[in-house]
Amino acid sequence: MSSDMQVFKLPDLGEGLTEAELVNWLVAVGDEIVVDQPIAEVETAKSMVEVPSPYAGTVAELHGQAGETLDVGKPLISISRAGSGSPDAAAPAALSSGIDASPAVEAAAETYRTEEKAGSGNVLIGYGTPGGATGGRTRPRKASVGVVDRLAEPVAEPVLEPAVAGTRIPGKLSAVISPLVRKMARDHGVSLDTIEGSGASGLIMRRDVEAAISTPESPAVLAPAPARVEAPAAAEGSLDGRTGLAVSARTPVRGVRKAVAANMTKSRAEIPEATVWVDVDATALLDMRAELKKRAPHETPGLLAFIARFVTAGLKRYPALNTRFETAADGSQEIVGFDGINLGFAAQTDRGLVVPSVRNAHKLSARELDAEIRRLTAVAREGKATPTELGSGTFTLNNYGVFGVDGSAAIINYPEVAMLGVGRIIDKPWVVNGELAVRKVTELTLAFDHRVCDGETAAGFLRYVADAIENPGGALADM
């Protein structure tokens, strides 16, 4: 390949994923582009991202078509250099290729590389989880170039002002290291052109954008850009061969839905799961909570926190359900146990289902569990949960009762081995001391991996949690 040709490879967008779908090209072959110009839209399991070019020059080749899934690290676009010695071309090349650059450039690049090693923002179930959560079966993370969903991490993230032909500031670096700051600025209507960067060589740091956002009268704050409205899938109009009906639309499976589908398929394919369930009289638990609320209305834990406390106590008695089943490359298998419990709970967000986990949940009281569940739910829905918070669970608690259903044939959150579901609490006839009464009843459903334990263990755990719900005072006294 000619030395004047630069190939930009699809970067790891900071989510630990190994692929992204090419949604739309924003440039065409023959176009003249500048550094930091968006060249394509790609969608990962968590977000739609505009990928900027680290090079200036002429578009020579587009490596892929809209709708195609591209692997991280594979060529995305080839660009002819704008000109030998061009500052617009040299600076990004220094960052991407490791050639000689100014100390400021190298410092900025090293800062970015160090921050990227810390991990990314959001991880879906089974994707990019740290610490070998899948027994060494996931592909390793590649060197990262950009991050999108790390707004929760308290680290400075450098980005550079967009290069505009003829307006380059001498001595000021003009290369994109990550789309994070641009996305933050765009989402809050902040113009990067009016911000004076506080980083090396005038780099605009995340703290600079945050300062502009927190100062409404700042000239950098513009009117918010209109939200992106995605067009619905186009109707095909052709007849379906099996049903004889006209096909109204074809919707590609991608992003969050694709990630969820892959994980659920893996769970169903690899885990021989079994299910046990039991109806539980939750009247005593509701009465106890009502009494506590009278004494401390703002400090009383929610029902899910109490059930979480019973679950962690039950897992201590039945640790087989708090394990992971691993198969090595040579075919050998083992059950991995843990010294502690990271309790995951299913949370529905705008972008799909995620499972944040309360680390070391076995050490927390019901009140502490309640506070952490509320915090994790909030950060997950804001898209600010960290990989550790989203990928480190050892057992999942799923409160699908909030959707108004009684039970569910749950799919285990791979690579865990069990999941406890809680249905809605409703009035039902119940026999109490030989007499019929109306009680508050819920259904508990336990799905478990039959490879790690038999029905006796699963039933023992389920009965323990059920008994604790029916006699919460005595259960809490014994914990």
Image (spheres, grey):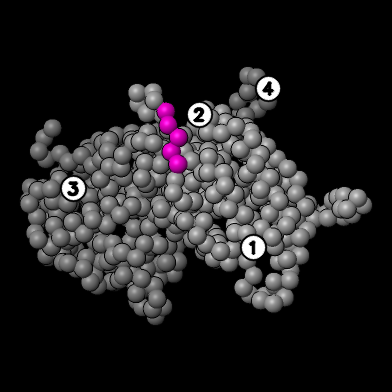
User: How busy is the neighbourhood of tag 2: few (under 14 within 10 Å), some, or many (20 plus)?
Assistant: few
Residue 368 makes an appearance in the image: yes
Q: Residue furthest top?
A: 241
Position of residue 10 measured from the top left corner of the image (x, y, whole percent): 29, 41
Q: Which residue is mark 4?
A: 243
What amino acid is labelled 3 in the image? Answer: Ser
Residue type at mark 2? Glu
Residue 75 lies, in percent from the top left, at: 26, 36
- Judged left or right of residue 47, residue 444 is right
Q: Few, some or many C-alpha atoms within 10 Å of disc 3 (few <14, some 14-19, many ≥20)?
A: some
372 relative to 434, above or below: below
Tell me the mark number nearer the camera, choosing from 3 and 4.
Answer: 3
Q: Amino acid at mark 4?
A: Thr
Quadrant in which the N terminus is drawn? top left
Q: Earlier in the sequence, mark 1 or mark 2?
A: 2
Q: Are marks 4 and 1 in contact (CB under 8 Å)?
A: no
Q: Report the residue marked by disc 1.
A: 477
